[in-house]
Amino acid sequence: MNWYLAVLKKYADFSGRARRKEYWMFILFNILISFVIGILGAIIGETGGLITVSLSGLYSLFIFIPSIAVTVRRLHDTNRTGWWILISLIPFFGAIILFIFMILDSDPNANAYGENPKLAPEPQ
């Protein structure tokens, strides 16, 4: 949960680097929250209804900029410019290439985007 909140605290920070753990924990919590929103909609009996759609839409709007920011910082961690996020606009292959970039290990040394975040303490 601390990793998720750490990304939200850096809401629109596109500079610096983000470790794999920070990125994937953020993705994991997004998936879990989406499931909870879907389950709440099913409990209410509004599957596909207005309440579920509006909750899901509001959450998507809330998380849109932080998810782009953490993806750009993750690309920086692999020593790539944040503009590589645009490769996801290429149907199918772009998403696969971006996924591969997200699972690659960090650049072990300092790069143009900052020091290796693995050397910094984890969020509390």
Image (tube, rainbow, N blue to C red):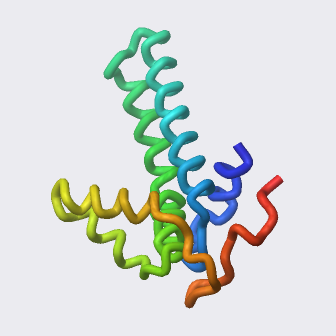
Residue visible at 27% across and 63% down?
88
23, 44: nearer the viewer: 23
Which quadrant holds the N terminus? Answer: top right
Residue visible at 68% across and 51% down?
3
**Residue 122: quarter of image:** bottom right
Q: Is residue 32 above or below residue 78?
A: above
Q: Is residue 116 above or below residue 26?
A: below
**Residue 6: quarter of image:** bottom right
Place of residue 38 in the rendered image (x, y in percent of width and height, measured from the top left)? 44, 23
Place of residue 5 in the rendered image (x, y in percent of width and height, measured from the top left)? 69, 51
Place of residue 102 in the rendered image (x, y in percent of width and height, measured from the top left)? 44, 61
Count all numbered tags in the image, as a single digit: 0
Q: Is residue 11 found left or right of 69 in the rendered image?
A: right
Residue visible at 18% across and 64% down?
90
Farthest residue in the left direction?
91
**Residue 29: quarter of image:** top right
Q: Is residue 70 found left or right of 22 in the rendered image?
A: left
Q: Is residue 122 above or below residue 39?
A: below
Q: Is residue 86 found left or right of 74 in the rendered image?
A: left
Q: Is residue 30 above or below residue 66?
A: above
Place of residue 28 in the rendered image (x, y in percent of width and height, measured from the top left)? 54, 41
Residue visible at 53% across and 25% down?
36
68, 94: nearer the viewer: 94
